[in-house]
Amino acid sequence: MRNLTYLKNCPIAVLGAGAVGMTLAADCKLGQPDREVRLYSRSKKSIAYMERTGIQMDGIQRNLYGFERSGCARLDMYTTDMAAAVKGAKFILLSIPALGHEEYLRRLVPLLEDGMVIHTYPDNYASFLLRRFMRESGCDKDVITGGWGSAPYGTRVEKIQGFRTNHVGIKYRAITLRGASLPMSDMDDFIESGKYLPCMDSVYTGNGPERGDTMIDIGFSNINPLIHVPASILGVSSMENWSLVYGNEPESYSMYSHGLCPSICRVQYQFYQEQVAIAKKIGIDYPKWDYEMFFSRRSILTQEYMGLDENGKDNVVFPLDRPCDEGNTGPNDIYHRYITEDIPVGCKIYHDLGVKFGVPTPIIDAMITIGGAFHEKSFFKETKYNLAYLGIGHLTKEQLLDYLYTGRYVDDVKSTNK
């Protein structure tokens, strides 16, 4: 292992000023006030007023061990200049929608410095893209890159009549997250580095990080496509009628609280079984969830922050036959990221892996088809996300596994000769 003690007090650069990015930055600053924390956004609007107001962080912060951190975090830098944000910052935390990864990562590659450690929340295949862009640009900086299946929190930005404030409210804090590095030869260092991130304190003082098995495993560990897509697609009538027909307060609909039902949970489990079949065919590990764990108003998410008992069962279950306000709100329309990101990114890559390795994915394919029909398009065709985009489409199974574990990469001869 490398000596990573230099990470203890180094500057932290957070790229992305959405709910998770703001919370990561605030959590790091409040957890280690003397640490330099910088927040970058490509949008001036998203960081407007922050120099005057700071970031106010609070919320229920539900978790098994009662970890809580609140306050007003006044960061050292709010900027739309990525070079200024990352210069000398050995920690780079990336948290933006997956469809924005390419723009951010292409800007980041020329700015990389030896010794940097990149954490992505959730990874959503960003590690594949970063390594691809590094190869294409001839960047040979010695960096560690990896990501997590989720963020350390369920968090939302408070809005007042549609106006975005600088207040984030944490619904829950994770006590465990599944992560991995690319390549896996950096795994020990990647997991060790997380100890020096205050935003990961609830995980490292909780049940600890869970070691994933390659970045493909982390793609399966991202529960957003698995939970969000079937519930959003199959519950679309409840969502669209929520205010107009049923007379409820606009934007109060919750896919968890109002959309889930036993039939949808059965579809989610079958969706998961297709992921399992792909992982087994490739020969990698995958997250383990039992059938009954899906039948809760928080689905399989609860164990991320409330844990499992001595028998491996959920400590907390929210029965489907009772009202529940535990879940975050959304989606409110078909343009929500639960559909426009989780389908053309997450579901599409699962489909492509199934095709490559000969594993049928009828449930996943149905979600892609119907979600596309909502938008009168084909998410099979109208997405840049495929295995070639990640840089792994041409690799054989053996070459892919070697790349994932050791970092040895075989160029696409056909592309090279074009």
Image (cartoon, helix red, strand yellow):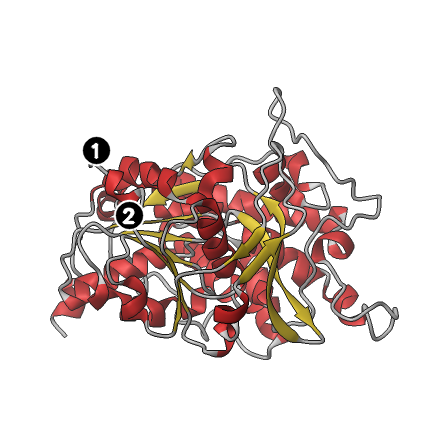
Q: Residue at x 22, y 61 (%)?
A: 112
Task: Answer with left or right where residue 367 lies relative to residue 135.
Answer: right
Measured Cα–Cα span from mark 2 to mark 1: 15 Å
Residue at point 20%, 62% (across, down): 134
Q: Which residue is mark 1?
A: 1
Position of 314 with respect to 49 (left or right) is right
Answer above or below: position of 210 versus 77: above
Question: Label 2, on which residue?
Answer: 182
Residue 127 point in image, percent of width and height: 32, 55
Residue 140: x %, y % from top left: 13, 57
**Crowdedness near tag 2: few (<14), some (14–19) or many (≥20) residues, C-alpha within 10 Å:** many
Q: Secondary structure at mark 2?
A: loop
The kind of secondary structure element at disc 1 is: loop
Q: Position of residue 272 (x, y in %)?
A: 55, 45
Q: Amino acid at mark 2?
A: Leu
Q: Quadrant of residue 101?
A: bottom left
